[in-house]
Image: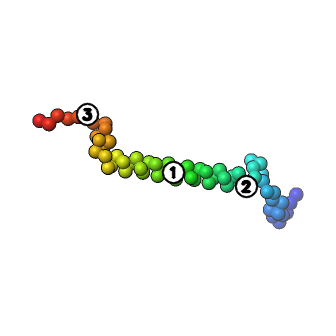
Amino acid sequence: MLQNGSHLLNTSSQDPVLGRPPWVTTTLGCFLIFTIVVDILGNLLVIFSVYRNKKLRNAGEPDREPL
């Protein structure tokens, strides 16, 4: 049995739960952050395009005849 926190000194270079090296976790985290940022920027471009283009703003409405 380990006492006085000596188990903290027995750390290995791998994640004990999943058995992955730390660089894999870091790479996956960076990839997910990059994907989220690109998704947000893409959505902002779509919103900006709809805001700028009148035909896109009225795409869901039928054409109305003037009275």
Residue 16 left/right relative to 52: right
The residue under the point 17% across, 34% down is: 65
- The residues bearing labels 1 and 3 have C-alpha atoms spaced at a distance of 33 Å
Mark 1 or mark 3: name the one nearer the start of the chain: 1
> Can residue 29 be seen in the rendering of this structure?
yes
Where residue 60 sits, quadrant-wise, is: top left
- The residues bearing labels 3 and 2 have C-alpha atoms spaced at a distance of 55 Å
The residue at the far left in this view is: 67
Foreground residue among 45 and 9: 45
- The residues bearing labels 1 and 2 have C-alpha atoms spaced at a distance of 25 Å
The residue under the point 51% across, 51% down is: 38
Marks 1 and 2: CB-CB under 8 Å? no
Mark 1 or mark 2: name the one nearer the start of the chain: 2
**Badge number at residue 62:** 3
The residue at the far right in this view is: 1
On the image, numbered disc 1 is attached to which residue?
Answer: 38
Marks 3 and 2: CB-CB under 8 Å? no
On the image, numbered disc 2 is attached to which residue?
Answer: 22
Q: Classify the position of the N terminus by image quarter.
A: bottom right
The residue under the point 57% across, 53% down is: 33
Q: Are there few (<14), some (14-19), or many (20+) residues within 10 Å of tag 2? A: few
Q: How many marks?
A: 3
Amino acid type at image mark 2: Pro
